[in-house]
Amino acid sequence: MFEGLSLTHILLFLVILLLLFGAKRLPEIGGALGKSIGEFKRSMRDVQNEFNTSANPPNRMEPPPPPSQPPQPPKAPGA
């Protein structure tokens, strides 16, 4: 990812950041960036889980309907 960057490039980038934001703001910016990346990863994991569960719904076995019983003939009185 950073194949074209040498140590000199990275140090120059850090010095420019230090000049732009100051020493007091850099830890705040780093913390906010870390939280943002964590939230993004969490959201991506949630979306992926939702996609996987909706693509493969669980196999639910519904119980079979109760067997239908044939109608019983009415009993004759006195029998």
Image (cartoon, grey):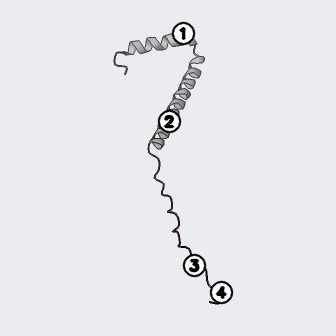
Q: In the structure shown, which secondary structural element does the residue marked by tag 2 occupy?
A: helix
Q: Which residue is mark 4?
A: 77
Residue 72 appears at what percent x and percent y?
57, 77
The residue under label 3 is which amino acid type? Answer: Pro
| Marked residue nearer the N-terminal end (4 or 1) | 1
Secondary structure, mark 4, is loop
Q: Nearer the viewer, residue 22 or 44?
A: 44
Whichever of callouts 2 and 3 sits on the residue coming sooner in the sequence is: 2
Q: Using the numbered discs, state the Cα–Cα distance from disc 4 to disc 2 in whole angstroms.
A: 69 Å
Which labelled disc corresponds to residue 47? 2
Q: Amino acid at mark 1?
A: Leu
Residue 49 locus on image (x, y percent): 48, 40
- Please tell me how crowded label 4 is: few (under 14), some (14-19), or many (20+) other residues with Cα within 10 Å: few
The residue at which mark 3 appears reads as 73
- The secondary structure that dominates the magenta segment is loop
Q: Position of residue 68 (x, y in %)?
A: 52, 69
Residue type of the residue flagged with mark 2: Val
